[in-house]
Amino acid sequence: MSRRFNSFREFYPYYLSEHRNRVCRRLHVVGSGLIVLLVGAVLARLLSPWWLLAVPVLGYGFAWVGHFVFEKNRPATFTYPLWSLMGDWVMFKDVLTGRIRF
């Protein structure tokens, strides 16, 4: 059964409930952190812009391993692509600020 959300504020608690496994959260944070480093390296001209093609592989690769192997659930990306992407970055910020346990 697919639940309907009217706002990201409603969606985010659901998103967090799909990331209870600590290893899954860690894999999300690692993937997001690598994206930040990669984009920074491209902007600093340390890497060719072609490296930006790796962004989806890093982001989704780490996250999906976390879901399929550790969380044993279906990533929210398949049902809520935009809100899931937003959730990734809000969760990344929440982990970095200590609001969510790493």
Image: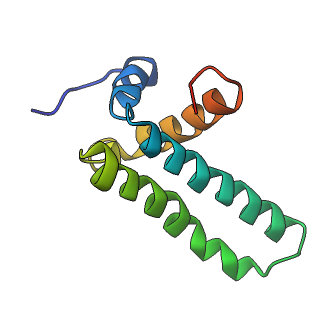
Q: Nearer the viewer, residue 77 or 19?
A: 19
Horizontal side, residue 51 vs residue 9: left or right: right
Which quadrant holds the N terminus? top left
| 67 w.r.t. 60: above or below | above
- Could you tell me which residue is drawn at 31 percent across and 43 percent down? 71
**Please, which residue is most extreme toward the left here?**
1
Number of numbered discs: 0
| 83 w.r.t. 17: above or below | below
Q: Nearer the viewer, residue 39 or 96?
A: 96
Horizontal side, residue 68 vs residue 43: left or right: left
Residue 102 in the image, given as x and y percentages of width and height: 58, 33
- Could you tell me which residue is drawn at 58 percent across and 73 percent down? 54
Q: Nearer the viewer, residue 101 or 28?
A: 101
Res 55 → quadrant: bottom right
Q: How is the image coloured?
A: rainbow
Res 38 → quadrant: bottom right
Residue 40 in the image, given as x and y percentages of width and height: 81, 60
| 42 w.r.t. 33: above or below | below
| 16 w.r.t. 58: above or below | above
- Could you tell me which residue is drawn at 45 percent across and 18 percent down? 9
Res 97 → quadrant: top right
Residue 31 in the image, given as x and y percentages of width and height: 57, 56
- Could you tell me which residue is drawn at 28 percent across and 50 percent down? 78
